Image (cartoon, helix red, strand yellow):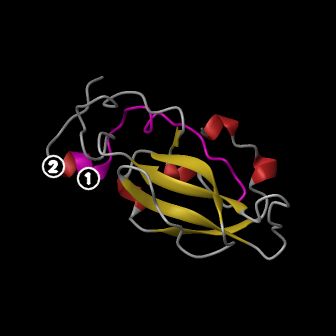
Amino acid sequence: MSALIGEDEIIHEVDFVWLEEITELDYVRQSLDRLPTRKGRPAYHRDGRMVGYALLGPSAKPSRSSGTFRRRVFWLLPHDRDAVPDGLYATGAPAEAVDPRTLAPGKKGRKTERSEGGPTSPEVRERGLTLPL
C-alpha cells in the first residue's frame, strides 16, 4: 500500500519508466516489489497491467538475505476506473492508489480530488462518460 511506503525506502530512485501515458489516468496503484535488478522492466504477475516502474541508482544496495532490490511498480486492475468508469471506483480509490501527476523519484505521491473521483480525466470525458458525484 502506498501509505506503507516510506520515503526512506525509495531514496535511491532516479527515474520512472512509464509504459502508458499517465496524464490520461486518474490514479495508479503502487507497490514496493522485490526485484532482481536495479533497472529494467520487471516481470509482472498480477491481474491487470503494469503501467510503469522505478529505476534505481548505483548506490542502491540489494537485500543481504535475498539479493533483491525494492523497487516501485505502478499498475492497474481490470476493474479500476480507467477501464470501468462507473464501477467500484467511480468515486474513491484503492488504498494503494495515488494520482500519477504527484509522483516523482524518491517521492511517495498522494491522493488528490481527481484520484478520488473528480474532476474526470480527459479520456473519460472524450468517451462521453461521467463519474457520479
Residue for point 65% across, 35% down:
3
Magenta stretch encompasses residue 51: no
The part of the chain drawn in magenta is: 106-124
Disc ID at residue 92:
none
Residue 11 x %, y %? 79, 58
Q: Is residue 22 left or right of residue 58?
A: left
Q: Are marks 1 and 2 in contact (CB under 8 Å)?
A: yes
Above or below, 49 against 37 in this view is above
Magenta stretch encompasses residue 110: yes
- The extreme left residue here reads 128
Above or below, 133 against 25 in this view is above
Q: Is residue 53 left or right of residue 131?
A: right
Q: How many labels were placed on the picture?
A: 2
Residue 35 x %, y %? 64, 63
Q: Is residue 54 left or right of residue 45?
A: right
Disc 2, SS: loop
Residue for point 70% across, 52% down:
107
Residue for point 40% across, 45% down:
26
Q: Quadrant of residue 36?
A: bottom right
Q: Quadrant of residue 77?
A: top left
Residue 41 x %, y %? 52, 72
Q: Which residue is mark 2?
A: 127
Disc 1, SS: helix
Q: Which part of the image, by quadrant, shows the C terminus?
A: top left
Callout 1 crowding tier (Cα within 10 Å): few <14, some 14–19, many ≥20: some
Disc ID at residue 123:
1
